[in-house]
Amino acid sequence: MILLIGGHGNLSLAAQRYFGGSKIHIVGSEVARLWCKKNAGELISNYFENLTVRPDLIINTSGIVNPQLEFSKLLDANYHLPLNLNLYSQQSGIKLVTFGTIMENNLEISNSNPYLFSKRKYFEYLLNSKLDRNSLHLQIHTWYGGNRLHNHMFLGQIYNALMRKISFEMSSGAQLREYHHINDDLAALQLLLELNCYGVHQINHGEVISLRELAESIFRSYGLLELLKVNKLKMSQYEILQKNFVRDRLLNSIHFRDTRVGVLAYFKELQKESHDIQIQ
């Protein structure tokens, strides 16, 4: 049995569909919030002891990605919860999967953003811990393909501009990113689990794209390139500007979809629900 922490976020919903052939037990947000507090080990242990079926795997899909939210909430969700789950995992022998961000590797970038700082805290804990085979931490890039787009994120803002046919202002767009369809990364997770991998793994596909290249591709595909306004916003002084993501050979069998094609297909799927505008 797989125990999923979190029930309604993009990652949880995608995981529920992807691992739908397995028995899944979902720990909802009300219970997960209690597990975010310091010294919540007894609560977690009691919960597992009361389950009729012992899980073989714990996947923590819970987390907060909006850096504008209260910092204590970010810290609870992105540091204290996975920390408490990890401590229980080490005690019980049940494998735990946690998700970080590729940017938590960069101290300066992490310190420049409350969300990234909260993710870095758990990563630092892992670096300073003696990890055994029960812990698998995946450092992921930017996801698309979930049930919803976040308005505070780049793709969400682009989609909103396209649907409303309003100008989209951005920086120079020199920042480099990898965009991954969430199902492709779940396939990578499944493979790593089959290989009994543990420790920290970067989920890189190697197709690095600048934010400007991606934005231009999307707006051009809609025939609305005139809405894109480059060099209107200031870029953060801490950014990824060099290609330094290397694809893990363990993931060579995983088919990661092309970024431009994949993102446009995702936008088209979203449009089927809204019926606002069609891709040209």
Image (cartoon, rainbow, N blue to C red):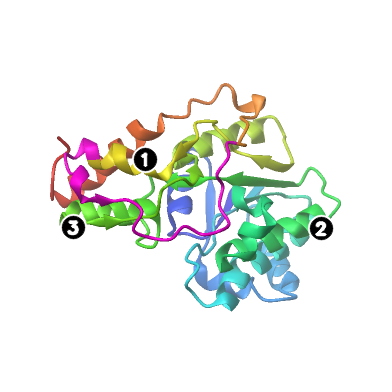
Give the Cα separation between the discs numbered 3 and 1.
Answer: 18 Å
Q: Quadrant of residue 241?
A: top right
Mark 2 Cα-neighbour bin, 10 Å: few <14, some 14–19, many ≥20 = few
Quadrant location of residue 82? bottom right
> Percent x, y for residue 13?
43, 51
The x, y position of residue 197, in whole percent, is: 72, 36
Q: Earlier in the sequence, mark 1 or mark 2?
A: 2
Task: Where is residue 210? Give x, y as percent.
Answer: 44, 41
Label 1 – label 2 distance at C-alpha: 45 Å
Please say if the residues under marks 1 and 2 sit with CB atoms less than 8 Å apart: no
Judge by depth and name the residue closer to the eye, 28 or 204. 204
Magenta residues, start to end: 220-243
CB atoms of marks 3 and 1 within 8 Å: no
Could you tell me which secondary element the residue under label 2 belongs to? helix
Inspect the image, locate mark 3, and give the three-letter code of the amino acid beneath it: Ile
Looking at marks 3 and 1 on the same chain, the residue that comes earlier in the sequence is marked by: 3
Q: Is residue 156 magenta?
A: no
Q: What is the C-alpha distance between the residues marked 2 and 3?
A: 53 Å
Secondary structure state at the residue bearing disc 1: helix
Residue 51 makes an appearance in the image = no
Residue bearing the label numbered 3? 166
Q: Which mark is residue 214?
A: 1
Residue 91's tag is: 2
Image point (64%, 40%), residue name: 202
